Amino acid sequence: MQERSSVGDLANQLKSELNRYSPGGKLPSSRALVERFRVSPVTVSRALAQLAAEGLVVTRPGAGAFRAAPRDAGPTVGDTSWQEVALSADSAAELVPRTVDASAVVATLAAPPPGVVEFNGGYLHPSLQPERAMAAALSRAGRPGAWGRPPVDGLPELREWFARGIGGAVTAAEVLITAGGQSGLTTALRALAPPGAPVLVESPTYPGMLAIARAAGLRPVPVPVDRDGVKPALLADALRATGARVFVCQPLFQNPTGAVLAPERRGEVLRIARDAGAFVIEDDFVRRLVHEDSGPLPRPLASEDPDGVVVHVCSLTKATSPSFRVSALAARGPVLERLRAIQVVDTFFVPRPLQEAALELVGSPAWPRHLRAVSTELRNRRDTMTAALLLNLPELALPHIPSGGYHLWLRLPDGTDEQALFTAALRSGVAVTPGRPYFSAEPPAAHLRLSFAAVAGTAEIAEGVRRLRAACDEVLRA
């Protein structure tokens, strides 16, 4: 954190002094800046790179940094209106036009303005991330010899580690290493469903997966879930009605409801899919964010599937950092070759140093310590947010308190304007996630998703709920 702050401070200081130099004038050398500001050479290099990206300086290897010439009025503005026709032409010929809309995903990736409580985040707060362990792992992984081309399927030792985590009869030969869970889901959907096909999804479900499906020209069809996961009878009905050959689900700590697929439904879901000749894409995205009081976790569906029905996706990202994008796809049978082919065509392979760093991290004593610490902290944060909501916002229904994951799913009073509440909350200094993007069809009611993992601690949770109370007073009593 200190390094990032020093870079910004130095860049701002240099920016304030640029008027001392004429256009083309040379700035002090990197060595002089290191001595003057008592920072590292890396900090100087990054600060100059930041100014260069802003067009304020020009760096010339071996010569130094120079003040950039003033920008002219800018290039001639062209006419890009022709692109509207070009981009819509292919969609017009498709049975289900593609909709490339990343807004719901970007909403969880963009940092809120300073001072706003982040109840809309999808990743661990930096204080919960194993930053030192990741830095040490990456340092060890960057040794000479680790920069060559890895096997396209991934490092054998890493594939073996993921296979052991899945369990059952899954072997390392049936695992592919991918660059994050989003990449794994994209590969799986492209492999299993042709453009124009229906794909069954839980309702509500993860907006990022809906965005993937629509961008691929697929037609998401909702199958309702309750606190015990997807409803098998409705899944069977949907498969018969649509002829779909793919069902995407999150059996463990489902996003956004937090539901866990009940034991009596697990085998039924697999049987229904197998009888319909359909694949189940199992997004096991948050298994390592279990709360301290959860008890034993059910195994992945893939561990109970001898027939190749399940294509399993799991990731290290949620338990580490948004930038630690290492995940796995597991499948058996002919579909594995199709998954491999799409993975290679799209990305070639996951960079070897990142795979090596993942192996270093999960094999270190720091890894189990980190998971235990996060498990305890997430339970404390969940309990703090739950108690604050029940006390201060009893009109917001909380049908299920999860024992894993990083968020709560709230139903708003009937007739609530979800977007108005979202806007009022932001004015009050708290960022929340509206429920509408989680539904592939008309939602049955208005909802909010509140994350307790992306904030600094329990005090910030209490403050965020207080601010949300003010927003609710503004909207619900209007």
Image (cartoon, rainbow, N blue to C red):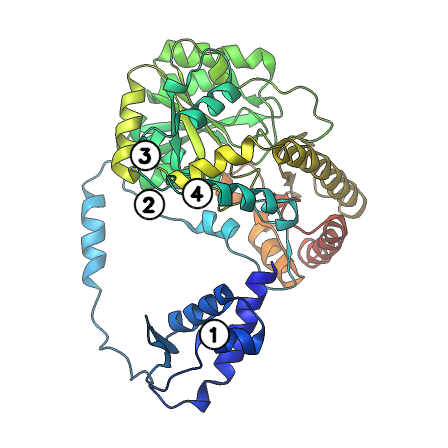
Depth check, front residue: 249 or 305: 305
Instruction: Confirm whether residue 441 shows in the render.
Output: no
- Label 4 SS: loop
- Percent x, y of residue 196: 27, 32
Label 4 packing within 10 angstroms: few (<14), some (14-19), many (20+):
few
- Label 2 SS: loop
Mark-to-mark CA distance, 3 and 4: 43 Å
Q: In which quadrant of the rendered image does the C terminus lie?
A: bottom right
* Residue identified by numbered label 2: 99
- Sequence-first disc among 4 and 1: 1
Determine the residue positioned at 21% across, 72% down. 78
- Label 3 SS: loop
Q: Amino acid at mark 4?
A: Arg
- Percent x, y of residue 91: 23, 44
- Percent x, y of residue 320: 56, 40
CB atoms of marks 1 and 2 within 8 Å: no
Mark-to-mark CA distance, 4 and 2: 43 Å
Determine the residue positioned at 46% across, 66% down. 46
Depth check, front residue: 32 or 286: 32
Label 3 packing within 10 angstroms: few (<14), some (14-19), many (20+):
many
**306 horizontally vs 360: left or right:** left
Instruction: Reply above or below: 466 against 250.
Output: below
* Residue identified by numbered label 3: 218
Mark-to-mark CA distance, 1 and 2: 51 Å
Q: Amino acid at mark 2?
A: Thr
Q: Residue furthest right?
A: 391
* Residue identified by numbered label 4: 143
Instruction: Confirm whether residue 323 shows in the render.
Output: yes
* Residue identified by numbered label 1: 31
